[in-house]
């Protein structure tokens, strides 16, 4: 019988330990398993190996998530693991469980259903801009330091949409 996955789990979802990860409805990525292996509860990796399905996203989906995160202004906030879990949810056309608001924001932008594992899920889809802390120049994406005065940039809300 072919498993029918319903949710991709990110690291925060697994660490919350609120769900039975041996259920055939959950899947994650190898990068998530690697993050858990580095954490304080590394023994969970031994327990979940062979129980929790592990898959990798397609490279074109990873690129699509990067482009979406760039458009929302979340790219600098997402780790490669974060991008992998969103891309896998995109590949499988299933929901994603995460407590990371940047992951939830990009997922919603891509039409992926999300829910929180331990925290309340986001109530707004946000598009970010970056403002120089020195001269106030606004950038569409994080470029590091201001090209005018050299000061650092701070993320600010450009626009948002209330979600249910």
Image (cartoon, rainbow, N blue to C red):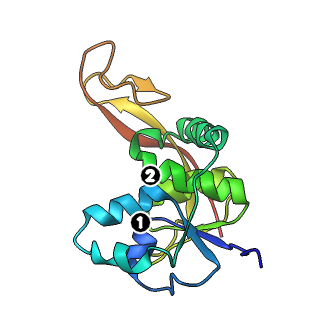
| Image: 4 above or below 85 | below
Quarter location, residue 35: bottom left
Observer able to see residue 78: no
Tally the marks: 2
SS class, disc 2: helix
Observer able to see residue 3: yes
Of the 4 image quadrants, the one containing the N terminus is bottom right
With 28 as the anchor, is 152 left or right in this view? left
Q: Residue at x 51, y 79 (%)?
A: 51
What is the residue that sits farthest to the right in this orientation?
A: 1
Q: Residue at x 44, y 45 (%)?
A: 80
Of the 4 image quadrants, the one containing the C terminus is bottom right
Q: Earlier in the sequence, mark 2 or mark 1?
A: 1
Q: Residue at x 39, y 24 (%)?
A: 143
In this view of the protein, which residue sits in the foreground, 101 or 44? 44
Asked if disc 2 and disc 1 are in contact, CB closer than 8 Å, the reply is yes
With 1 as the anchor, is 34 left or right in this view? left
Q: Name the spot of residue 75 as percent of width and height, x first.
A: 47, 40
| Image: 159 above or below 107 | above
SS class, disc 1: helix
With 129 as the anchor, is 123 left or right in this view? right
Quarter location, residue 58: top right
Q: Name the spot of residue 94 as percent of width and height, x first.
A: 70, 65
Q: Name the spot of residue 8 as percent of width and height, x first.
A: 58, 67
Q: Which mark is residue 81?
A: 2
User: Circle 1: is it few (<14), some (14-19), or many (20+) Cα within 10 Å?
Assistant: many
Q: Residue at x 52, y 75 (%)?
A: 52
| Image: 115 above or below 129 | below
Q: Which residue is mark 1?
A: 11
């Amino acid at each position: 019988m072919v498993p029918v996955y319903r949710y991709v789990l990110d690291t925060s979802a697994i660490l919350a330990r609120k769900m039975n990860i041996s259920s055939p409805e959950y899947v994650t990525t190898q990068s998530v398993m690697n993050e858990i292996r580095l954490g304080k509860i590394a023994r969970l990796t031994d327990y979940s190996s062979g129980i929790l399905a592990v898959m990798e996203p397609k490279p074109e989906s990873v690129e699509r998530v990067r482009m979406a995160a760039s458009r929302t202004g979340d790219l600098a906030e997402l780790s490669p693991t974060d991008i992998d879990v969103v891309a896998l949810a995109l590949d499988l056309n299933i929901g994603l469980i995460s407590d990371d608001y940047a992951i939830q924001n990009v997922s919603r932008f891509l039409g992926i259903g999300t829910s929180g594992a331990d925290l309340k899920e986001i109530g707004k889809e946000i598009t970010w801009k970056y403002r120089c802390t020195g001269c106030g120049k606004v950038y569409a994406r994080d470029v590091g330091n201001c090209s005018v005065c050299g000061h650092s940039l701070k993320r600010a809300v450009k626009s948002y949409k209330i979600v249910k």
